[in-house]
Image: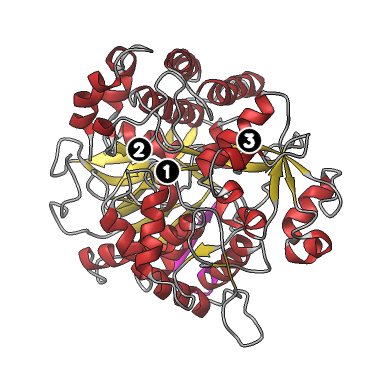
Amino acid sequence: MRGFSDPSRALGSGDIVVVGAGLAGLFTALRLAPLPVTVVAAAPLGEGASSVWAQGGIAAAVGEGDTPERHAADTIAAGDGLVDHNVARVIAEEAPARIADLLRYGVPFDRDLAGHLVLSREAAHSARRVVRVSGDRAGAAIMQALIAAVRATPSIRVLENYEALDLILDAGSNAAGRCAGVRLIRRDAAGSGTFDFMPASAVVLATGGASALYAVTTNPVYACGEALAFAARAGAVISDAEFVQFHPTAIDAGIDPAPLASEALRGEGATLINRSGERFLLRLHPDGELGPRDIVARGVFSEIASGRGAFLDCRTAIGARFPQAFPTVYAHCRAAGIDPVTQPIPVAPAAHYHMGGVATDLCGRTSLEGLWAVGEVAATGLHGANRLASNSLLEAVVMGARVAADIACLIAPDTARPVAKTYRVAEDRTLDVAYRDYLLARLRNTMSQHVGVVRNGGDLVRALKILREIGIEAVGDRSLVNMALAAEIIAGSALLRPESRGAHFRSDFSEPVEALRKRSAVTLDTIRSAVTAAPAAGGPPVAAASFVAELSL
């Protein structure tokens, strides 16, 4: 595939624009200091970012007897044949240094009486290597520390309540052109007939994932995949978009977004049972509740579909310690009328993390000149077909440091000057609010029903038809158009992988295919032809191998 090469010319004057204010975006901005950076945040800092909601922690081989090699090996095993081994090695090796960075920023990781970091074990890890804060408050604590650091850094300015809608291109070194800026809209000005254009010397996408495209999700409303769509529309290559991880233990209480019952609960010995009290996962995987997330999620999905229900039983393993050991989960349970000390917690799979995204190299460069991506919006090859628990926050900080270092090498400090002025331009008005809400609900229901835990070719074709109809109906509302396109990219990529692997399970192609054991890479043109290119349900999956191979990274 094209891309990942040096820019055709030096980065010039103007903002380094970081779109997104979660862990990946703020860490990248801090590492770019003292270069001037503008962070575009869709909500006030600390609100709306998935990072704040992260409960488990950050995986890093910092414990006695653990090594980066073991961490990388666990990552590769979880990824079901698609993890880039070099990426896993580099990120595992750089993990301890990034934990040290976070400590310097003031993150209060849990320590024992001797001052050592408290480490927990999560699913598919071979050792205790997850650093955490107050049991289940890692994301919030990390974000609080980074927000304070950003506020105290003069070279960083934050534009709050602005949403990115599109990339602006000019002539570059390849046919797709060069990213020269971002089209923004103030959230309180949506439908007013105006948007803002911000020129940029470099653009870093750090917008998070796409799981809010699903009706049942653990993610905030802002995690709707818009950057995936507008990067693809600008010509960027998208990788592994078919792989959506469903967290197996969202609290099933009819709340949107669904509160999360952290993986750490199972790490502490909590079990998954059905209404009969059976630990059903023991018949699905030798590690039971600590098996890979895709297997656990499908097991929970199957129990619910069969009418037997699924419940997380913490009564014996955690019991009376629950309020102090896991205060966030405890509060969610109590708000839903559940006492996890004495009652099993009803759970269900929920869209949680997108392994795919804008394809990048180990410097965070995309195939589009002038555009970098970091965090969940990016696809580095670390996660493969199934993310290893607590590797996502790690990837955000490791790759954030790498993106910052790469940009710093390409930009001259004397020409990097913030361009405070944005340019106001006319735009189409948005849809009627009620009709927009209807289209969005239809989109999210379509994704959950047809592109969910278990998929098949017929459902995926139906989903693509509906999503394209929504995209047409939404013209005039660029944000909703972006969401429909992001959903279409995920559904189309799923249709183009006629096998089951990791988090991508197709009932019509229920086994992995060796010829397809490679990462996918698609463009918008590829997705648009997905229906005609994909093999028919029940047909030989190997027939599509040459097609997928042409698109592979």
**Figure quadrant of residue 349:** top right
How many numbered marks are there?
A: 3
Nearer the N terminus, badge 1 or badge 2? 2
Under circle 1, the secondary element is: loop
Q: Residue at x 75, y 33 (%)?
A: 254
Under circle 3, the secondary element is: helix
Q: Identify the residue position indicated by label 2 in the image.
A: 240
Q: CA distance from mark 3 to mark 2?
A: 24 Å
Q: Is residue 89 above or below residue 459?
A: below
Q: CA distance from mark 3 to mark 1?
A: 20 Å
Between 331 and 301, the residue placed more toward the observer is 301
Report whether 451 appears left or right of 260: left
Q: Residue at x 21, y 63 (%)?
A: 410
Q: Identify the residue position indicated by label 3 in the image.
A: 300
- Residue 28 image point, x, y percent: 40, 63
The quarter in which the N terminus is drawn is top left
Asked whether disc 1 touches disc 2, contact meaning CB atoms under 8 Å apart, the reply is yes
